[in-house]
Each structure stands twice: as C-alpha cells, then as structure tokens.
Image (cartoon, grey):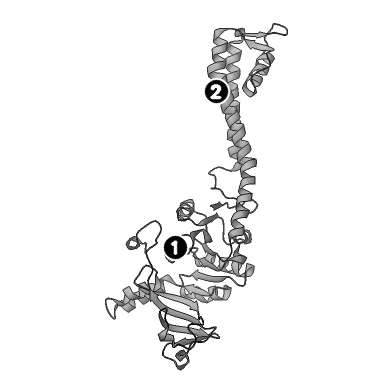
C-alpha cells in the first residue's frame, strides 16, 4: 500500500518517473502519430476510396474519413472500394483504432478514475491507522527498526514508513508496511500518516538537522505520540530532546558501549545485543504492572526478571527498598525469553550493521 508524495495528491501509487504534463503530452503525441500513419496511407491510396455524396475525394474527405474510421467504424458516406484500400483498413487502421482507444482509456484511467480510486483507498487505509507506528526515514536504522518490530510480532500493516527513496519504500512494502513517499518534515505528510493517532514515531532521517526538524513538526501536531530519534552527534542530543523526542539514540555511543562491555568478557557484548533485540535468547520488555504483579518483588515476577521500574517518574532499581513490592501504576522493565525469528527479507545472522 502506497501513499504518494504531493500535498494535494497523497494517493496510493508509485511515483512516476515523468511529470504528469509530460506523460499526458507523450500520450497525445503517440495518438497523433498513429492517426498520421492512417491519414498518410489513406491519402496515398485515395483512389481506392469512393465518396457516395459527390464522387470526388479531397484532402478534407481523406482527413474526415481517417478520423471517423479511427474513432468509429465509419458512416458509409466514404468507403474503400479497392482491395489495397480494404487491406490497409484491415491490417493498419483497425490496429491503430484499437491502440488509440487504449491510449484514450488509459489516460482517462490515469488522470480521472485512478485518482478517485486512490483517494478512496487512502481514506480506507487511514481509517485503519490508530495506535500505529510511524518510521520516518528508511535507511539502515529504519530498516532494522521495521525488521525488529516484525520480529516482535507487530502487525506490519500497522507500520507506516515515510521516505523519498523508491527502492527503500519497495522493500518496506514487500514486508507488508504502509509506505508514504513524502517529506516527513512537512505537516501534510505527517497528517496523512495520521501522526495524531499514532502510538510511536521513530525518526532516523540520516542527518541530525532533518531528524530534529521532523521531531519538532511531529510534536507540534501531536503531544501524545511517543517519539524516538536517532542522533549521530553528541552535541545534538539535547536539541533533539528539547524538540520533543522522548528517546534519543546515538548509534556511535551504543556501539561504544558494546565495545567497552566486550572488554570485561567475550560474552558481555553478545548478551547486551540479545537484550536489545527480539531474535536473541533473552530480550528486554517494558510494560505496565498488572494486578498479578502487585505485592511481588521486582525480581520475583512470573513473566520475567524485573530489573527496573518507574513509579511516579522515579526510576527504581531492583536492589532498592521500593522494589520489594510492585504497585499498580508502576512501569516495569524486565528481562524475558527471546522471541522467534520473524525477520523480513533476510536471516537474522545476515542483518546489516
């Protein structure tokens, strides 16, 4: 499912390589060329035609006969009478008539019927978008985010990918995501993606300034959406948070953490990677406390090993006294068993860096 890039034309279709006026011009030129072939043939063999009105064949008669023959089957006032004229109409003019009609019908479909269909289909898709995930930027990080969401059994049809690269969108579309060919820094693009109804926005635009602008635009359109942003420069992390990002991720810093952790043992980095991903043997999971958790210690949950919880905005570690009894309203971070490999497009061991 595809949403196009233009503000007034955000439709479910692939972006054309030619502007609309050029496409229309080429079709008109092709139709005129085919009609010119029929006109030239009739004029060269005008002696094979008979005018039942006055008996004379002029250029006007040939032009009239050609247009009537190409667009209809003729009225019988001018008819071919020789074998050559009839064979020309049979093997040249009849195929030209079919091609011209196909051009007319295709143009009507592209510029009228398809737009109506696309607008209707887009509205249907938009009505289904609620509590969904929006990924703005489908580079390496966005690609991995989509793969990881699918591994975590998130319905791919509830994920909207925004990008301007056709190959990237084609890959996301193959994975089942809704794709939007547009500029995520623009209000109209995010509105089409129903950012006000989205649960999460993941921003990885490739440039920190573009990422921060997307965050600013999204936060102005929705105060409730949870925004995660990939920032590559340490200096820009505070700016991203000020712009409205709830989570700021620095790939270089995370890689540094893995490298530093590996110095303490050969399996530390592997375990940290497992915690961050769903395809490993263990994974981190965040959820709200349930009635079954109430009164239990954070480390004694039935669903996993609780390592941290948040109560009234306060972070509580598993070793703190407050972690002795979970309360309703707590937000729990726990270590659980890793899920099955549901990666789209490539095996887990072939994931990109």
Residue 258 pos. (x, y %): 35, 75
Q: Is residue 100 above or below residue 127?
A: above
In the rendered image, the residue lying farthest to the bottom is: 321
Indicate which disc residue 95 carries: 2
Q: Dot 1 lies on which element? A: helix
Identify the residue shown where x is 39% and y is 70%: 277
Distance from label 2 to label 1 (Cα)? 50 Å
Crowding at mark 2 (Cα within 10 Å: few <14, some 14-19, many 20+): some
Q: Quadrant of residue 140?
A: bottom left
Vertical relation: 15 (above or below) 342:
above
Residue 54 appears left or right of 105: right
Q: Evaluate whether residue 283 shows in this view.
A: yes
> 10 Å neighbourhood of mark 1: few (<14), some, or many (≥20)?
many
- Can residue 160 be seen here? The reply is no
In front of the other: label 2 or label 1?
Answer: 1
Disc 1 designates what residue? 150
């Amino acid at each position: 499912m595809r949403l196009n890039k233009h503000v007034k034309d955000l439709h479910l279709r692939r972006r054309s390589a030619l502007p609309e006026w050029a496409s229309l011009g080429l079709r008109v030129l092709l139709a005129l060329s085919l009609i010119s072939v029929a006109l030239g043939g009739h004029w060269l063999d005008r002696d094979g035609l008979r005018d039942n009105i006055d008996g004379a064949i002029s250029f006007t008669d040939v032009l009239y006969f050609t247009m009537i023959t190409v667009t209809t089957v003729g009225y019988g006032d001018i008819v071919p009478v020789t074998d050559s004229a009839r064979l020309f109409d049979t093997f040249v003019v009849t195929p030209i008539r079919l091609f011209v009609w196909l051009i007319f019908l295709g143009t009507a479909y592209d510029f009228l019927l398809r737009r109506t269909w696309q607008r209707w289909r887009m509205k249907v898709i938009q009505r289904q978008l609620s509590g969904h995930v929006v990924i703005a930027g489908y580079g390496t990080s966005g690609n991995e985010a989509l793969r990881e969401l699918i591994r975590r059994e998130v319905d791919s049809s509830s994920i909207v990918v925004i990008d301007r690269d056709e190959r990237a969108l084609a890959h996301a579309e193959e994975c089942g995501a809704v794709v939007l060919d547009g500029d995520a820094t623009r209000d109209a693009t995010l509105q089409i993606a129903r950012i006000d109804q989205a649960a999460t926005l993941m921003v990885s635009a490739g440039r920190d300034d573009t990422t921060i602008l997307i965050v600013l635009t999204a936060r102005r359109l929705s105060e409730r959406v949870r925004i995660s942003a990939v920032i590559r420069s340490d200096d820009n992390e505070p700016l991203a948070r000020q712009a409205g990002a709830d989570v700021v991720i620095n790939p270089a810093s995370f890689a540094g953490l893995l490298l530093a952790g590996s110095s303490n043992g050969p399996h530390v980095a592997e375990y940290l990677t497992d915690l961050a991903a769903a395809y490993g043997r263990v994974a981190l999971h965040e959820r709200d406390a349930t009635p079954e958790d109430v009164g239990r210690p954070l480390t004694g949950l039935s669903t996993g090993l609780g390592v941290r919880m948040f109560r009234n905005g306060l972070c509580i570690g598993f070793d703190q006294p407050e972690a002795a009894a979970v309360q309703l309203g707590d937000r729990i971070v726990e270590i659980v068993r890793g899920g099955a490999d549901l990666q789209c497009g490539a095996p887990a061991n072939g994931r990109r860096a």
